[in-house]
Amino acid sequence: MALYFFTPFIAIILTILGGGIIFYILGFNPIEALKFYFITPISNLYGLSELLLKATPLCLIAIGLSFCFKSNNWNIGAEGQLTFGAIVGGGVALLFYNQEGFYILPLVILAGAIGGMIFALIPAILKTYFNTNEILVSLMLVYVSKLLLDYLVVGPWSNPEGFNFPETRQFSDSSRMPLLFESLRIHAGIFLALAAVMLSWFILYKTYLGFQIKVSGLSLKTAKYAGFKGKTMILVVFMISGACAGLAGVGEITGPIGQLHRMISPDYGFTAIIVAFLGRLNPFGIIFASLVVALTYLGAETAQIFLQIPKYTGQVFQGMILFFLLASDYLLFFKVKILNLKKNELRH
Amino acid sequence: MATDLRISNISKIYPGCVANDNVSLQFKSGKIYALLGENGAGKSTLVKILSGVISPDNGEVFLNEKNLKLSSPLDAKKNKIGMVFQHFNLFETLSVFENLSIDATEDNKSLRVRINEILKKYNFSIDLDVPVLNLSAGQKQKVEIIRCLLRSPKVLIMDEPTSVLTEQETEELFISLKKFCDEGILIIYITHKLKEVLSLCDEVAVMRKGKVVSVSQTQNEKVETLANKMVGQKLAKIKKKINISKNKDEIFKVKHLNFYSDDPFETNLVNLNFSVKKGECLGIAGISGNGQNELFQILSGEIITPDTSIIFRNKEIAKLNPKQRREYLMAFSPEDRISQAAVPELKIYENVALNNFKSSNFFEKGLVNERKIKEHSKKILSDFSVNTDNVELKSQFLSGGNLQKLILGRELITAPELLICYNPTWGLDVGAINYIHETLIKINNQEKSTILISTDTEELLKLSDRIAVIYKGKLSKIMPSEEVTPEKLGLLMGGGSID
């Protein structure tokens, strides 16, 4: 059991070692490169604020996903739910583009959560009533929502004074998340993420719904035998998951971005899958994991600036974390036996 | 070339269960051998040893007087022992040819020639280039057989091969097997179907509780004699008092229970009708795989079948799920303790909360009432003498017997009017079995009813007031248990008929 929460640390250490080796092969001094990657970005206040800014959506989405994953529902379309939430929330924000009022931001946030929820209900309903595979449906819907966003920012919602740039008007200040500090980008969305952590801990460990999720995840046969309403539960976990992704989307557009355009998320929805598993689907583990993974985003940007390494190395690091996590799980929980076989024996 | 396979003093012991107890057998090519036994008799263990999947604790295997070291399936292949398992090992999306070429050593061209030769020789009609998922169960099995034949096996072991076949496919299979036999392949046929043994095999070895209890020529056997050997003759004399009184109320009544499944590993149920009286134990006997799983799930509400009528205490409950049925005071104890009735990774009190009936108040307004669940769990642990008082213990650390006591306790503490249990003592030691039998008798004496679905005839004869036999999804006439003898049961379980 202790081992179970220990493997993520092993995975992170192995990822750093692996990254060092890659930098060495690319001809960089690995120590220096890793320093640029993991230390420089957070060595000042601005960097810490950026870290929290990036960790916020990751944490929110991963919290939502943990409900799905814990109950054996494989929602991998959080990126789509994020985008659709941003579209709906952004739509409401655009309605109020020239108005001020305290009520606007809550409306926008609520609209974003509902948008994500509705979009997540599509794979859930198809799964429960038509027996489709939620992995495929949720994944394909990501592209649907991204193309819809593309169409909106180029077409009907594009800024009339925007010289045909693919973007909408700027939201009014009343639709923007309040900043926590002058001159730093970190905004009030982080409280949404923290609230989600608390709430999810309460639901997962203290309620009947949480108990049903736990049992279904461990044994569907038992859940059926106990008479849990399986269909309702699938719908509920997808709704929770979609709402969290929608909140993350709306947090981005009302926070650092301030309008809708094509690139509202650097694949937070997909990266959050890694966060959820690195955090062991545990609410507090997810906080920790979201910080680690957010650092890979920041490190990639710093490395690009100082070392001219493409920022896509961030994805390499994220991939390595998941790879090493799965590998250490596998090696720690299964016994490996090395067989001495000649090649042609294997073929028989 | 004649083949001679000899198994000498094989033993395999699992914790709490002797799967093979000093088994010695001899097989010679030119004959088809049957290995007959109930589930859990040790057939599968023996076959797994022969195919190298598990190693025996003791004993040796000789092929043509050569001592074989079978430490992996590769060793079995090298020694020309072929095996067709009950569940197919094929890649559904690959074509037949691709499946066969995966572990072939020759190039595709000569492989195709050899496969075509086999197809022609044995009259198999299979299109080599269609994906396996388009094949029927019988055709898939033929692909598996071809895979074995490609390696020119000396021994071919078939594990319950007809469980997924139609009558027609079964006949075709038998013709092929006889052909293989004539060509000198030694065939070992594993089954629990008595009629197949009589129509196909030359010699039959019967296993019971890990031991070989008889080896004989099939021509000297009949369905009844084999059935008796298979289930054992012991008739428990400690019968409970028979409390059938003709005019007691029917508390539970099932009408027109039909179940059709597309899954070839499930059994269809055909028009089951029966009823249970107050304070009565209705036993349902049968060799496993004849529809007991499906029947249990329908009675518990895990599967809802249309057009079935289930009346319980004068209410129609056929459309209710297990949780709702529990509210009407039904309780269920499934066969699979470890992955269905309880979750090993959960703590004892969490497993207790699985039986969440309304008056328990385990979950008030959607919140977990941990204190209440733990109190309730403590009471179960002490009332049903589970050998721990720690409700925080994960249930994977309980022995089978204690886990079953916990499950029965969880189900019975609500004082249900009807308990439905399926193989409640499966795999338990004598002490636990006695405890559970006493408990079941006690609830009958308290005027509560039970339905006991079991593959253990001894248990059924000991506990039931009336007994019916399920065979291929059909239920026999229900008989008062004093009229039932082990012979009668054996006959019905093997598909025979009485009267």
Image: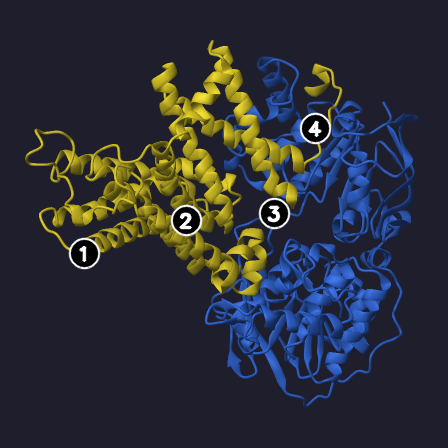
Tag 1: residue type?
Answer: Phe
Would you identify the image quadrant in which residue B405 lies? bottom right
Asked if both marks, 3 and 2, belong to the same chain, the answer given is no
Q: CA distance from mark 1 to mark 4?
A: 76 Å
Asked if marks 3 and 2 touch (Cβ < 8 Å), the reply is: no
Q: Are marks 1 and 3 on the same chain?
A: no
Q: Nearer the viewer, mark 4 or mark 3?
A: 4
Give the mark, 4 or 3, whose residue is nearer the N terminus: 4
Chain letter of the residue carrying label 1: A
The amino acid marked with disc number 4 is Cys
Q: Which mark is residue A102?
A: 1
The answer, for residue A298, to whether it is visible in the render is yes
| Element at label 2 | helix
State which mark lies toward you, 1 or 2: 1
> In the rendering, at what x and y percent does residue B269 appear?
59, 61
Q: What numbered label is drawn on residue B148?
A: 4
